[in-house]
Image (tube, rainbow, N blue to C red):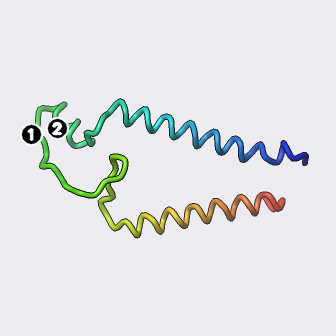
């Protein structure tokens, strides 16, 4: 293959990541800081649930063990890199 065609898949992948990031930021901007519980309770007239305190990053908080989420994310990243290298070798 010619070099531009080899990079076409990577460019499409990066474009998908950018589109997903834009949609995620737009959704966060539209919905605001309220979680699903707060929005649902107000919509149906129930009392608001008690406020939970936790460490958050960019408006998100991990409810379980952060190390477990990091491990799963790491495994997914390694799997993607392995599949990308495997595909580039012509095995796919």
Q: Position of residue 21 (x, y in %)?
A: 51, 40
Quadrant including the C terminus: bottom right
Residue 46: which quarter of the image?
Answer: top left
Residue identified by numbered label 2: 41
Residue beneath the point at 61% across and 40% down: 16
Residue 50 vs residue 2: left or right? left
Residue 60 vs residue 91: left or right? left
Q: Describe the element under mark 2 as helix, strand or loop.
A: helix
Residue identified by numbered label 1: 47
Residue beneath the point at 27% across and 41% down: 36
**Outermost right residue:** 2
Evaluate if marks 2 and 1 touch, with contact meaning CB atoms under 8 Å apart.
yes
Number of labels in the image equals 2
Residue 80: which quarter of the image?
Answer: bottom right
Q: Position of residue 12 (x, y in %)?
A: 69, 41
In the displayed structure, would residue 17 be above or below residue 92?
above
Residue 3 vs residue 17: left or right? right
Q: Residues within 10 Å of mark 1 (few under 14, many from 20)?
A: few
Q: Residues within 10 Å of mark 2 (few under 14, many from 20)?
A: few
Residue 88: which quarter of the image?
Answer: bottom right
For the residues labelled 2 and 1, the Cα–Cα distance comes to 6 Å
Residue beneath the point at 22% across and 43% down: 37
Residue beneath the point at 35% across and 30% down: 30
């Amino acid at each position: 293959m010619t070099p531009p065609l080899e990079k076409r898949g990577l460019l499409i992948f990066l474009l998908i990541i950018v589109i997903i990031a834009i949609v995620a930021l737009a959704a966060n901007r539209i919905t605001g800081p309220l979680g699903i519980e707060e929005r649902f309770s107000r919509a149906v007239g129930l009392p608001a649930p008690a406020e939970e305190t936790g460490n958050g990053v960019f408006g998100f908080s991990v409810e379980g063990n952060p190390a477990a989420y990091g491990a799963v994310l790491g495994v997914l990243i390694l799997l993607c890199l392995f599949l990308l290298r495997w595909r580039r070798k012509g095995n796919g």
